Amino acid sequence: EPGSQLQGKKVVVTAGPTREPMDPVRYFTNRSSGKMGFALAEAAAAAGAEAVLVAGPSSLETPVGVRRVDVTTAEEMLQAVLEEMEEADVIIKAAAVADYRPAEVKGSKIKKADDRLQVELVKTPDIAAEVGRRKGRRLLVGFAAETDQVETYARDKLQRKNMDMIVANDVSEPGAGFEGDTNIVTVFDKHGEVLRLPQLSKREVARRLIRLVGERLDERS
Ligand code: PMT
């Protein structure tokens, strides 16, 4: 029956960038509008799931039927995901998490002085890898934003982070990746390619990915 494919399932989706402060007025971030992840949460809700969207800063409206948890930094996103994953069946990581943050966050605005400014960065937690370590029977779907050797890097991430599937998008390709309304994706699991989609709206990509997730859950039960 359409719209009931994920009935009784809880799906947690991360979306958007994270923002890592340097001082009260400046931060490091990644390019991401949140569109891909918001569309996934919307599609999960439309398929009957309890859909939770853990969202970094984004100006998008919360999709109908979705519970949204707003976060700012990678650390906050990790905490929110760990909390929400307890009861989850599926975790989809479409967020563009900042890989590094300033080592020190100044309490007051850094004054403009020298021509060069050195900022020391430290690694943020790898949320997908952390979820991968604790996932148990949950289905973990990651994304990979690459500019070259898309398949090689995507399959490497799948394995390293213990994901069940990875959705690769070549962010150097027009019509794919961040900010626009369309995407071009290929999905891999540990055996190889499972789905290759042409350029489609992010909402349509999301519907097809959610359908694939539903099929994977059915195969398991
Ligand atoms: O938001 P839009 O404008 O619609 O753009 C969509 C998108 C291009 C951001 C999205 O489709 C996408 O590819 N998201 C993942 C971007 C990314 O950061 O990829 P990555 O290759 O750096 O990371 C691989 C995976 O690990 C991702 O699932 C990411 O969420 C996760 N990760 C990465 C770093 C980190 N510290 N923690 C993580 O969980």
Image (spheres, rainbow, N blue to C red):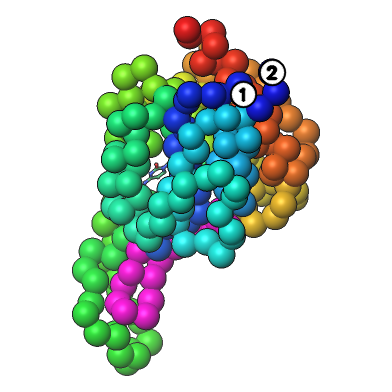
Front residue of 125/78: it is: 78
Q: Position of residue 128 (x, y in %)?
A: 38, 36
Give coordinates of residue 154: x percent, y percent.
Answer: 52, 31
> Which residue occupies 69% across, 18% down?
1
Q: Which mark is residue 15?
A: none
Q: Where is residue 70? Give x, y as percent.
A: 41, 57
Dot 1: what SS? loop
Count residues near mark 1 (Cα–Cα under 10 Å), then give few for <14, some for 14-19, many for 20+.
some
Task: Say which residue label 2 marks.
Answer: 1
Q: Quadrant of residue 129?
A: top left
Which range of residues does the magenta coloring cover? 20-34
Q: Quadrant of residue 183?
A: top right
Identify which residue is drawn at 55% across, 15% down. 216
Give the amino acid type for the residue marked by disc 2 in the picture: Glu
Taking the magenta stretch, the answer to whether it contains residue 178 is no
- Which image quadrant for residue 137? top left
- Does mark 1 have its CB less than 8 Å from ligand 1? no
Label 2: few (<14), some or many (≥20) within 10 Å?
A: few
- Say what secondary structure mark 2 lies in: loop
The residue pinned by badge 1 equals 4
Residue appearing at x 24%, y 71% in the figure: 105
